Image (cartoon, helix red, strand yellow):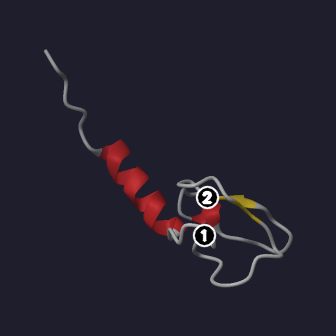
Amino acid sequence: MTAASQYQLAAGEVVQCPRCHYIRSSRDFGATEACPRCGVVYSSMATAAKRRSESPQSREV
């Protein structure tokens, strides 16, 4: 499973927001690609996390 797809809400699946940790369930309404509590778009967070993990780490000497 890719990072972007792990936040997709399937029927009966529970998803936790990576920013505010709100647990989204199938009872929540509205756009399934965004957190109903803080509004973050799950795929945006996954993309940002991937970019951070791929960027070279700067070392302090």
The disc placed on residue 35 is 1
Alpha-carbon distance for marks 2 and 1?
Answer: 6 Å
Which residue is at a point 77% across and 72% down the rendered structure image? 10
Left or right position of 16 against 54: right
Give whichever of discs 2 and 1 has the lower sequence position.
2
Which of these two is toward me, 10 or 40? 40
The answer to which image quadrant residue 35 occupies is bottom right
Using the image as rendered, state which of residue 58 and residue 40 is in the foreground.
40
Instruction: Specify the amino acid type for callout 2.
Output: Cys
User: How many numbered tags mark residues here?
Assistant: 2
Q: Mark 2 points at which residue?
A: 17
Q: Which amino acid does label 1 sit on?
A: Cys
Give residue 18's position: percent from left, percent from top: 56, 54
Give yes or no for contact between labels 2 and 1 (Cβ–Cβ under 8 Å).
Answer: yes
Taking the view exactly as shown, the residue that stands out farthest to the right is 12
Asked if 41 appears above or below 61 in the picture, the reply is below
Quadrant housing residue 58: top left
